[in-house]
C-alpha cells in the first residue's frame, strides 16, 4: 500500500518526503485554500517536490467547465492526476478526461455503489472518505472493505485510495482491507512512526553506549 500525504503545505511535504516513503500527494480545494496563495504556484511547488501521483482537484461544478479545467490541470505535469467529484457532472467530465488519456481520481465517494461508478468510467483512483463516513455514525472501514472486495471480484483496475483517515489504526485497517493507497494528514504521518517503546529503547541504547565510552576513557 502506497502512503500519500493529504496536504497542500510544501513544508510538510518536504519533511515527510525526506523519509523516503512518500508515494504521492492528494490536495483538495479546502487544503489549497488554507495556504492562501496562488493555487497554480502551490501545485507547481508540490509537483516539483514529489515524483509520484499528485491529485489536483477541479472546482467547476458543470461537466463542460470541469472537463476544460481538468485538461488544464493535467497539463501541469505528467504526474498530475485530475480529481473530479462523484456527481453526474463529475462522471461525464471524468469519462471524457479518461478518453483523452488523462488519469483521474474520483473523490467524495462514500459508498460501494459510487465506487462501482468510478471504476466503470475507468478512473485511475477512487477515493472513499473513511473518516467522514464514521462522522455520520456509519462504518467507513466496512465501506472500504466492501469496495476492495468488489474491485477484486470484478477485476477493476482502478486504485482504491483510502482518504479522510484520522489516526494510525485507520492506515493499518486500510492496508488489511487491501487499499492500494492511504492518504493522510501530516499529523497522522508523524504518528505512524511513533512508539513509546522505540523512544525508551533508543534512550537506553544511547545511555549504555555513553557509559561504555566513559568507562573506556577512564581506563585509558
Ligand atoms: O482530501 C480528501 C480527504 O482526505 C479529506 O479528509 O479529513 O477533510 O475528511 P477530511
Image: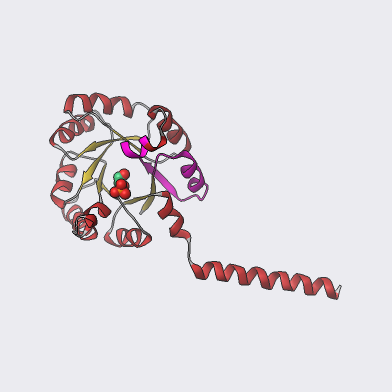
Question: Where, quadrant-wise, is the C terminus in this rendering?
Answer: bottom right
Q: Residue furthest right?
A: 220
Indicate the quadrant containing the N terminus: top left, top right, bottom left or bottom right. Answer: bottom left
Q: Was residue 15 drawn as part of the magenta stretch in this picture?
A: yes
Name the colouring of the figure.
secondary structure
x, y percent for residue 20: 49, 49
Q: Which residues are magenta?
A: 7-33
In the depicted structure, whether residue 75 falls above or below residue 163: above
Left or right, residue 122 beside residue 74: left
Please give left or right for residue 35 compared with residue 98 in the image: right
Name the residue rendered at 43%, 34% in the picture.
Answer: 47
Whether residue 89 appears in magenta in the rendering, the answer is no
Foreground residue among 176 and 122: 176
Q: In x, y percent, where is residue 200?
A: 56, 70
Residue 15 placement (x, y as % from top left)? 51, 46
Quadrant housing residue 36: top left
- Residue placed most toward the observer, 88 or 81: 88
Residue occupying the point 61% across, 69% down: 203
Residue 209, by quadrant, is bottom right
Residue 146 position by quadrant: bottom left
| Residue name at image x 47 percent, y 39 percent | 10
Amino acid at each position: 500500500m502506497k502512503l500519500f500525504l493529504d496536504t497542500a503545505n510544501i513544508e510538510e511535504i518536504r519533511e515527510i518526503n525526506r523519509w523516503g516513503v512518500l508515494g504521492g500527494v492528494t490536495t483538495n480545494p479546502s487544503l489549497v485554500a488554507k495556504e492562501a496563495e496562488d493555487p497554480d504556484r502551490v501545485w507547481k511547488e508540490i509537483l516539483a517536490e514529489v515524483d509520484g501521483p499528485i491529485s489536483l482537484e477541479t472546482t467547476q461544478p458543470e461537466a463542460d467547465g470541469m472537463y476544460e479545467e481538468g485538461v488544464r490541470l493535467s497539463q501541469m505535469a505528467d504526474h498530475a492526476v485530475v480529481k473530479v467529484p462523484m456527481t453526474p457532472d463529475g462522471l461525464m467530465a471524468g469519462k471524457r478526461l479518461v478518453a483523452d488519456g488523462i488519469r483521474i481520481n474520483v473523490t467524495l465517494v462514500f459508498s460501494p455503489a459510487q465506487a462501482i461508478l468510478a471504476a466503470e468510467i475507468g478512473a485511475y483512483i477512487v477515493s472513499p472518505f473513511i473518516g467522514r463516513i464514521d462522522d455520520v455514525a456509519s462504518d467507513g472501514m466496512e465501506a472500504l472493505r466492501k469496495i476492495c472486495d468488489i474491485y477484486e471480484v470484478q477485476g477493476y483496475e482502478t486504485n482504491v485510495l483510502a482518504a479522510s483517515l484520522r489516526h494510525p489504526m485507520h492506515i493499518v485497517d486500510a492496508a488489511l482491507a487491501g487499499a492500494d493507497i492511504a492518504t493522510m494528514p501530516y499529523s497522522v504521518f508523524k504518528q505512524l512512526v511513533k512508539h513509546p517503546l522505540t523512544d525508551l529503547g533508543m534512550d537506553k541504547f544511547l545511555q549504555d553506549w555513553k557509559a561504555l565510552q566513559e568507562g573506556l576513557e577512564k581506563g585509558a
